[in-house]
Image: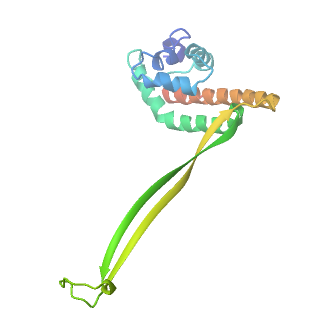
Amino acid sequence: MKYKELFTSENGLFQTVFSDDGTVSTLADEFSELFTGQTRQSMDSLAVGLYGNRTLLDYLTADNYVTFITAVVYTHLQSWKKLHDALYAEYGISDGQKIVDVKTGSITAVSDSDQTDTDSNKAFNEDEFSQRERHETVGNNDRTETYNELTNVRTITGDGSEVLKNIDAELKVRLFNLQRQMLSDIIEDICTDIY
């Protein structure tokens, strides 16, 4: 069976496997994260246009393809997320400049201690001690600790807005190429054709 015979632009792989009412509800969230800027229908149209004449595995039928493709997606999901996160980290400047906010505070602890020692050459059970044989120690410990807490805040500045637009456009192009690669990974695992 050909890909376009099982999946159409109106009832495609993304609309069924990654739908909100799909068998695995988290795949809808994964689609929203990984396929930013795309709709399920647009990805299905792209898949039919690029891979419609490929032959599906004999195992895939209209009854079991959701389970099989869900498993395929989960085998690739971690590597896709790493690529996606690396892409956003590389182009993170388009989100804005990082501003560091420092929060300071202090902790104070007070403790008093009294201690009486006796002369070491007196027996421990003698009752009478002279003032000379007794050593009293009074201590007062104060502890003050200061801490700094760093908070990163992202904001877009007015400087270099043209540069930010160019970086954002390049991010979108690279993101679309990554999305095509993710689509290709799924197709390669469910089709017998290489080309």
Residue shown at the point (41%, 69%) measured from the top left: 139
Q: Position of residue 44 (x, y in %)?
A: 56, 16
Choose between 164 and 75: the one closer to the eye. 164
Image: 73 above or below 61: below
Side of 54 relative to 62 (left or right): right
Q: Nearer the viewer, residue 95 or 98?
A: 98
Q: Position of residue 107 (x, y in %)?
A: 49, 52
Along the viewing direction, whichever of 42 and 87 lies nearer the viewer = 87
Could you tell me how many numbered marks the image carries? 0
| Residue 69 horizontal side relative to residue 118, left or right | right
Q: Quadrant of the C terminus?
A: top right
Work out whether residue 2 can be spotted.
no
- Let me know if residue 172 appears in the view: yes
* Colouring of the image: rainbow
Q: Quadrant of residue 110?
A: bottom left
Which residue is found at the position 17% from the left and 83% from the top?
125
Spot occupied by residue 127 in the image (x, y as percentages of width and height): 19, 82
Task: Please determine whether, in this image, residue 29 is positioned above or below residue 92.
Answer: above
Q: Which residue lies at the image location 46% right of the left edge and 35% below the top edge?
A: 75
Farthest residue, direction top:
10
Q: Position of residue 38 (x, y in %)?
A: 61, 19
Question: Foreground residue, 99 or 186?
Answer: 99
Q: Is residue 184 left or right of residue 96?
A: left
Residue ranking furthest to the front: 131
* 146 with respect to 165 (left or right): left
